[in-house]
Image (cartoon, helix red, strand yellow):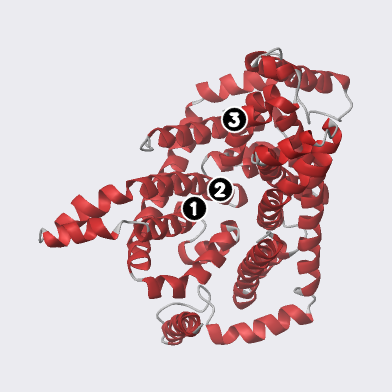
Amino acid sequence: MNRRLATALAGLAGVAVVATLLEAVVRSGWISPLVIAPPSALGRAFAKLWAEGFLAEPFALTLGQALAATSAATLVGIPWGYLLWRRPALGAAYEPWIGAAFAAPTILLFPLFLVIFGRGYATTIFVGFVAAVIPVVLKTREALIGVPRVLLDVGRSFRLSERALVRRIAFPAAVPAIFTGLRLALIYALVNIIGMEFLIDFGGLGRIVSEMYFRYEIAGMYAAILLIVAVSWLVLAALGRLETWLRPR
Amino acid sequence: MAETALAPLSKGAAEGGGISVLRIRTITIVACLAGWELLARSGLLYGEVVPPLEKVGAAFVELLLDADTYRHLAVTAWEVGAGFAIGFAAGVAIGVPMGSRRFLGDALVPYVNGFATAPKIVFLPIAMLAFGTGITSKLALGALSAFFPVVINTMAGVRQIDPVLVKVGRSFRLTPLQMATRIYLPALRRSLVTSMRLGFGLAVVGVLLAEIKLSAAGLGHLAIEHYNNFRVPQMYAVLILVFVIAVGANGLMARLMPRH
């Protein structure tokens, strides 16, 4: 515990040093405040963002889209992953493709979605969905494959029907690993949606960065970027906590 | 092998009575192409949103024959290549001390994770303020995108080095250079290759998204120019080219992976 506190303090001290250095570099005129906003200006910038309704509402908007995309990915991805497990031929045929899609830069397809859906929530949510559904499918299949044989054999010795075997044993045993897929899904959806919002100047947090840049409000732009970093980190950390809490010990 | 664990659950496939992988794949591809073509000819979606395949094919051939394509490709390749090199070098330079000094690593990890998770494209305005809206800002974004996975994987790799190896090196009184080339580098090969793959992939994404947002050259610029002028088949052709290159590069790097 003491050590954890020490590392946390050291990290904060590092941040303070970096902030002081940036402040000094800008104050001395070495780098223009139009390139790097002095850290001391960030407080006021956040207050201004808040006053203009550029904090809470965009945050809710972005998170809402990410949740919508993740829900859709869950509804589509879990049955899909189940099918790939239940029909091994399909699994063998599609798994390598889906794995490749996981590594492929799917966000680069966004102009295609833009053409099909237009510049609106349908596009941002769809981009989030595409990023989110892949880990759900892969992890669901992986989770079901990983169900210990013994558990299934116990069910068989009780003469459970195939349906009951899946519903009472395979799925409950797979839940923790499926949750890993959902966690990845939400993070990917969130990150891709923020990126999309920035790219097409539409929606929540990402749009604010773009708008501040074009307004030339440099401190506001830095504040919005820091907010995005903080939100990404918080969601990542919160879901990590939730996962350890959910996992059977 | 993994599939056999569930084979008893499913009937047909267990005896190999199911249809083969190749057939499923062929059917899927044909069905997708046919579905696209039908959608294109049905007129359900207005205008040229879903162009017939022959138009996309023709646009792709035209793209490959156009000398201008290669000028854009060269710009993108330079931005990705140089950006990746810078990001990789910086990532290794910072990842190694973060791995070998546990306290330093633990103190910095939360911040690295925070930035690593956030979408890198939102840092583009900072790059443009610092370097202008030209090629350098795209290169910087490529470097930034590549940097984080490299730091994380290098650090993890250094932490996993067997301390016995280091002790052996010390007991032979190896010089720091010899330690680096004989002990650390071979032990790190796997995590360095992983770093390269992830970093390169993200550098491609970062650079192309930056080009799409605001640029005067590069494949991303080409794609969004076609989009803005509603030349849809041409835009699809560029996207196909980008995807082929990105996936090909990833496959090539996977080959570097040491087996075992």
Q: Residue at x 88, y 23 (%)?
A: B43
Q: Secondary structure at mark 1?
A: helix
Q: Position of residue B148 (x, y in %)?
A: 47, 58
How far apart are the two marked residues, 2 and 1, measured between alpha carbons? 7 Å
Instruction: Tally the marks.
Output: 3
Neighbor class of circle 2 (other Cα within 10 Å; few <14, some 14-19, many 20+) is: many
- Marks 2 and 3 on same chain: no
Q: Is residue B115 left or right of residue A172?
A: left
Q: Chain of mark 1?
A: B
Q: Is residue B94 left or right of residue A217?
A: left
Q: Position of residue B135 (x, y in %)?
A: 46, 51
Q: Which residue is mark 2?
A: B211
Residues tagged 2 and 1 counted as in contact (Cβ below 8 A): yes
Q: Quadrant of residue B197?
A: top left
* Residue B46 vertical position relative to residue A27 in the rendered view, above or below: above
* Residue A56 vertical position relative to residue A100 in the rendered view, above or below: below
Q: Position of residue A28 (x, y in %)?
A: 41, 87
| Amino acid at the residue labelled 1 | Lys
Q: Residue at x 54, y 78 (%)?
A: A37
